[in-house]
Image (cartoon, rainbow, N blue to C red):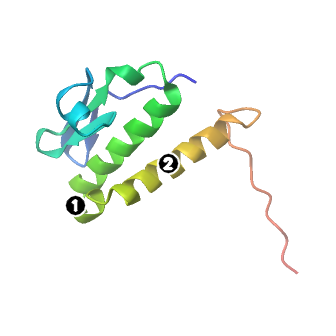
């Protein structure tokens, strides 16, 4: 699976960027693959996961969740790593479920049951 990373994007009216980083500094100190620097509106992703699409997808979604929550004023939720990891993990699951469909570009219609 190819992961397209938006290296420049907006959340509300704020410009954000994503940068590849060697696994050093804060990434190494925190033993993680990504960091969301809210004050710099920058997400740092470890270069060590460029060729690991499953880890890369979860990491970018995890850091995007931090960025969205903080920018939206939900700093307390953004500080809750368990919550952020749950949300990013569930979004990964949705994406991978879509990948398993016959035609991944078109969602399958949901059949509605007739009410009696």
Quadrant of residue 28 within the rendered picture: top left
State left or right for residue 48 relative to residue 79: right
Residue 35 horizontal/vertical position (percent): 25, 38
Q: Earlier in the sequence, mark 1 or mark 2?
A: 1
Q: Which residue: 37% across, 21% down? A: 48
Could one spot residue 41 in this view of the protein?
A: yes
Label 1 close to label 2 by CB (< 8 Å): no
Element under disc 2: helix
Q: Return the residue found at the far bottom.
A: 116
In the rendered image, the quadrant that contains the N terminus is top right
Most foreground residue, 112 or 75 = 75
Residue 3 horizontal/vertical position (percent): 48, 26
Question: Gap between marks 1 and 2, in whole Å?
Answer: 19 Å
Element under disc 1: helix
Residue 84 horizontal/vertical position (percent): 38, 54
In the rendered image, the quadrant that contains the C terminus is bottom right
State left or right for residue 116 relative to residue 16: right
Q: Which residue: 25% across, 49% down? A: 12
Relative vertical location of residue 11 with respect to residue 72 in this rendering, above or below: above
Residue 89 tag number: 2
Relative vertical location of residue 11 with respect to residue 20 in this rendering, above or below: below
State left or right for residue 22 relative to residue 3: left
Residue 98 horizontal/vertical position (percent): 65, 40
Q: Which residue: 24% across, 33% down? A: 27
Residue 75 tag number: 1
Q: Return the residue found at the far right.
A: 116
Residue 36 tag number: none
């Amino acid at each position: 699976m190819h992961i397209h990373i938006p290296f420049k994007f907006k959340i509300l009216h704020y410009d954000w960027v994503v940068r590849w980083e060697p696994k050093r500094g804060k990434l190494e100190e925190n033993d993680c693959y990504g960091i969301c620097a809210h004050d710099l509106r920058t997400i740092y992703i470890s270069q060590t996961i460029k060729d690991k699409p499953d880890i890369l997808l979860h990491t970018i979604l995890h850091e995007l969740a931090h960025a969205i929550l903080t920018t939206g004023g939900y700093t307390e939720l953004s500080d809750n790593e368990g919550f952020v990891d749950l949300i990013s993990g569930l979004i990964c699951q949705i994406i991978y479920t879509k990948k398993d469909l016959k035609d991944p570009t078109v969602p399958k219609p949901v059949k509605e049951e007739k009410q009696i």
